[in-house]
Image (spheres, rainbow, N blue to C red):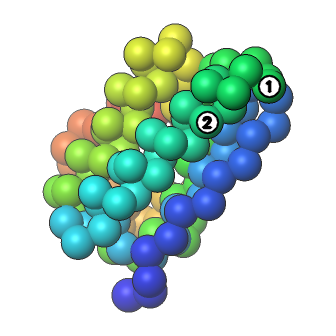
Amino acid sequence: MTATRIDGARDGDRLLITLRGSLDAMSVDALQSQLFDLTRLHDLIGLSDPVRQIHIDVAGVDFCDAAGLRMLVAARRVAESRQATCHLHDPQPHLRWLLRATRAADLFDGV
């Protein structure tokens, strides 16, 4: 497993988030806080349109447990509360299986 990392960038009303490493109980609190900060930063300073699309690249996620899954679902709720869409991009087979087995895949566009 690799170190957990989150990166984000804005492109108009789209927030692009890249997750790498493990989404587990050890990392999820810090990641969830960073995710919230990324969605709010530009809105607070008023320099751009509100976030209307959240795109999360999960290709680099090498492990995801129930805590990680809860974080992804929480990201979806953040998007929904902002009347935004939430897309997961390139989930590895293990993550795709977890999302489908728990029926969380239905919550995201692109899975």
Circle 1 sits on which residue? Answer: 47
Secondary structure at numbered mark 2: helix
Please state if 5 lies on the left or on the right of 96 as rendered: right
Q: Residues within 10 Å of mark 1 (few under 14, many from 20)?
A: few
- State the residue position of label 2: 41
Q: Considering only vertical position in the picture, is 64 above or below 85?
A: below
Other-residue count near label 2 (Cα within 10 Å), few / some / many at <14 / 14–19 / ≥20: few
User: Residue 58 location in percent, x, y?
Assistant: 52, 59
Q: Amino acid at mark 2?
A: Leu
* Left or right, residue 29 beside residue 78: left
Nearer to me, 96 or 44? 44
Q: In the picture shown, does residue 23 fall above or below 109?
A: below
In which quadrant of the rendered view does residue 41 lie? top right
Place of residue 32 in the rendered image (x, y in percent of width and height, measured from the top left)? 36, 49
Residue 67 in the figure: left or right of residue 52: left
Give the residue furthest to the top: 83
- Res 21 label: none
Instruction: Tell me where residue 11 appears, x and y as whole percent.
Output: 81, 37
